[in-house]
Each structure stands twice: as C-alpha cells, then as structure tokens.
Amino acid sequence: MGAISTGPISEAVAPRDLPFKEGVLRQVDYWATLWARTWRGVVVSSFLSPFLYVLAMGVLLGGFVAADPDQLEGAPSYLAFVVPGLIASHAMQTAVSETTWPVMGMIKWQRIYESMLATPLQPRHVVGAHLASVALHLTATCALFTAVMAPFGVYESWWGPFLAFASQVLCGMTFATLVYAFATRSRSEESFGVLFRLGVFPLFLFSGAFFPVSNLGDVGSWLARLTPLWQGVNLSRMFALDHVTWWVAGVNVAVLVVLMLLGWRWSVSGLTKRMIT
Amino acid sequence: MTDSMITARGLRKKFRQNSGESFEAVKGIDLDVRKGEAFGLLGPNGAGKSSTMRMVASVSPISGGELRILGMDPAVDGPAIRGRLGVCPQEDNLDQELNVFDNLYIYGRYFGLPKQVVRERVVELLEFAKLTEKAKSKVEELSGGMKRRLTIARSLINRPDLLLLDEPTTGLDPQARHVLWDQLFRLKHAGVTLVLSTHYMDEAEQLCDRLVVMDKGVIVAEGAPLDLIRTHSTREVAELRFGAGEHADHAEVIGDLGERVEVLPDRLLVYTHDGEEVLAKTHERGLQPLATLVRRSTLEDVFLRLTGRTLVD
C-alpha cells in the first residue's frame, strides 16, 4: 500500500464563502463528463422527437387544415403556425424531463448532491450548475429543432428564428426552475406522474401550440394566456411569423423572467431545506 | 493552527417529525477533539452519532449549544470548514455514472484544486486504496470493500485536516474490515485527525485513542478505550450458556461468584478478575452450562454496564 500525503490545503481553495460563479465553475468537469457520455443520445432525441412531431402534426395532419392566415395568427400555413409552438412545447417537456427524475435521483437515489455538499459547494452552486446543464440541453435542442425546420419555409424573416429560439430557451428555463423547485420538495416519484398528467400534458394540449387559444372561448382563452407555456408559444410564434406586437412580447418576457426567478429562489430554498437538515 | 479540531459545548440537534412533534437526537453534549488523535463516537443505532457527525461536517445546522470546527463557526464558515474536512458517509454515495478515476478527479475539482494537482493526487490515492488497476472500472463493478476504500480515498483528495468516518465498516465482511482498518491506521500514523462513529466495539478499541460512549443523545462515558474498560468493567468476563429460559434462575445460584452478573437472553455474563475460577466454582455448585467462554472485558461490557443494553440489538 502506498504512502499518503497529508497536510492542510491552502486558504486559496478554502474561502470563507464561495462566490457563485466559482462554485458553479468547479462543477464543469462533472457535467462535461456526463455530457461526454450522453451527448449522442441528446442529439438523436433532439432531432428525432421534433421531426416526428412536425411530420405528424405539421405535415400529415396539417395537410387537412386549410385555414385563412387570419385564423392562424398570421401564419401562411398550418405548418408555419404549429412549428414555433411545438418547439416551445418541446422545450417545456425537455426542461421537465431534466428536472424531475434526475433531480430526485441526485437527492435520493444516487445521492450525488450529498457528496457535493460535503465539499465547499453550497446548494445555490449545485442548483446553478444543474440548471446550467439544463440550459445547455435546451439550447442544443431548440437550436437543432430550429435548424431542421428552417428549410421548410416556416420563418418569415432572417432574424425571427433567432428571437424565437431565445424565447423557446427562456420558456424552457422557466419550467426548469419551477419544476426543479417542485422536485426538491417531492418525497416520491409518484408526484411526477401527477405533474405530467395534470400539468405538462394539459399545458401541451391547450396552451396554443396546436390551435389559436381564441378557439377556447373567452374564459378558456384567458386561462390559457395565464399559463407560462402560452407566453413562450406566443413569443416564439410572433417572432417566427414576424407578426410582433411589442408590448405583448414585453409582457410575455416579463412573465417568464419573473417566474424563472421565483423558480430559482424556490429551487435553492427547496434544496437547502432538503439537504441541510 | 489551533490544536483543538472540534469543540462542542451543550450541542443539541432537534428534528421536526412528520407528525409535527420535535425529536431531540442530540441532547446537549460536550466534545473536544485534539489535533492528530483518533476520536470515536461509540453507541447503538439511534444514539445520535450520525446527527453529531453531520453537524461536525457542517451540513446540519445546530439546534442549540456551541460548536467550533477548526476554530470556526459552521453557521458562517461552512464552505471554509468543509474545504478542510474529509467526509466518508455511512452509505457510499459514489457516482455510479463515473469510473473510479473520475470519481476521485471530479471530487477534487469541487475543492477548487488545479487539474494537474488533482491528477497527481488521484494517482497517489488509487495506490493508497489499492485500486490502481481498477482506475478505469465502473463503480458498480467494485466489491463492497473496494467501494468503501474508494470513498475513503475520495475523502482524502483535499488532504483534509480532519477526516470524518461515519460507520466506516458497516456491511463489510471481516477481511474487508481489516483491510480498511489497516488503511485508517496508516492515516492515523500520517497525522490525520480521525473522528469515527461506530457501533462496533472492536473497531472503536482498535482505532480510537479516545472515545465517547453515546446513548439516546447523551454521552454516558468518555475516555481511552482501556481506561473505560478498567473503570467500568472487570478484567475478565465468564460467559455461560444454559438452556432456554434457565439463565435468570442460574444467575441467582452463581450471583456471588463475580463482581456482578448480567442476564442476557442467550447467556449469563459473570464479571470477575478470574474467569476460570468462576467456571470451576459453577461446576462445583452442580450447574452444567451448555457452553462456556472466558474472555477479557470489552467496550461492549462497558456499554452494557452503563446503559443496561447491548450495542447491537
């Protein structure tokens, strides 16, 4: 058995309080190692799922939809209408998938967070790095989806796809922080089933991705407009179709940013209460 | 650096249970751990050892009293304290997604150590843990003993001033336990301050310079293992097994043969300075035990004396 060196480490690596950026950067190797193992799957699923969605909903189902552009919020075709909403919805689903079972696994099953928090890292660093990884995943997914859709002529300006892409990532990150906060407070995975059945699935169907929310009637459309997913779908579509009402876009962004910041706060407090007991 | 690694005065830990009632796991204990010593927390499950260890590890806020780790307050200096601690938890929390090398390397990066420094230390620690040939293996391919050794190696990546080991050999087979003890001896000789919690009296006796015996959240005795045995028990113990249900009756017959007699469900323990003499006199009195054993007193006997219960229920 070999000898072992001992002795105090330098004060430089044991600061009294660890700055946020420094704490997050210390986890780059961990997340990079995980990414190196999983990026192929991410790319394939990022390409395949939206491609199948668009093929089924936009092309095959959309082939039967012949509506006036005025009824499709200015979209020249049903494909052009549905794609921006589908990408925003896909961002939501990706974010939820990345912040439910993976977070519970790190808290409860593999207990990775426990090992991280035995080091100078604090809950805010751990949450920050995990959500940064989700942001990277969302960025890759939405960028790939957008690139795949570009040749189909669903974008009405050169700059529209870029702002639509930013809206989709923002929408995804809003769900990521909110659902992360939910996961830190969940004691069992059964709660995720409820979340998907009563939250994600109805949002996916009724937040304006597949049809204009005005079709839901007065009350229904206002309820739909209160959901975070509609904010993302609406932003994404306005930019993609180059039909931007700027004050509405401002409200959409503000709602998503406020919810994202609240989700961030709840995530850090949730993980702190769960792990620092 | 101060010579006092851990100082606790009236340390308390309360938890709120699901029922809404609070449960006090640690009820006002005092601790002093000095630099370079191997200090033990000995007690049965539920004694408050793990709660104490978590407070010392600066991942569990104290509910009352005072606590200083390396001269710092964990409530305000948590990151700085944890940067100088090594923690080996009761259950392995190695990353199953990573191989053996990466488990050590990535953990070292959490401490802010430069990449090259971590790589050098990983090589050194793999050698120390006898895992060099397993460097590229997945964690799930390792035996229980190897996983423990890897967890201990990981806890040393920052060259800690203070190493906390919570039940380090629970669940390991005897051979793996002895390999691990050998590792811990080497650390002790290298000057690392060790704090370990255990419910194995032999582990505490083997490894600890000094220990506290905990029961139901309080410290019931404190001292060096041999001193505790000398103070609270006799030199030898005669164990006598009789038929089921006969132990209490026979205890009355031979109760005067030792300083005291303990009646356990499966045997009688006679505390004496001469165990062989107790056995001879037992036979003289017409009793025929099914099995006998004379052994020296252990910390188990100390615990039995102080609490009326055995360490492992």
Image (cartoon, coloured by chain):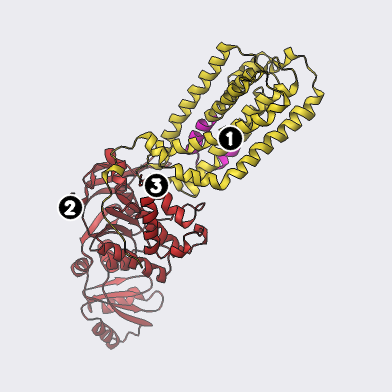
Chain colours: A yellow, B red
Q: Position of residue B284 (x, y in %)?
A: 27, 88
Q: Amino acid at mark 3?
A: Arg
> Label 3: chain?
B
Q: Are marks 2 and 1 on the same chain?
A: no
Residue range in magenta is A175-193
Residue bearing the label numbered 3: B109
Nearest to the observer: residue B110 or residue B67: B110
The image quadrant that residue B65 belongs to is top left
Which residue is the extreme one toward the right?
A64
One can see residue A244 in this view: yes
Q: Which quadrant, please, contains the N terminus of chain A? A: bottom left
Q: Is residue A15 left or right of residue B95?
A: left
Q: Which quadrant, please, contains the C terminus of chain A? A: top left
Residue bearing the label numbered 2: B3
> Label 2: chain?
B
The image quadrant that residue B72 belongs to is top left
Q: Amino acid at mark 2?
A: Asp
What residue is rendered at 74% in x and 17% in y? A76
Q: Are marks 3 and 2 on the same chain?
A: yes
Dot 3: what SS? helix
> Label 1: chain?
A
What residue is rendered at 45% in x and 47% in y? A112
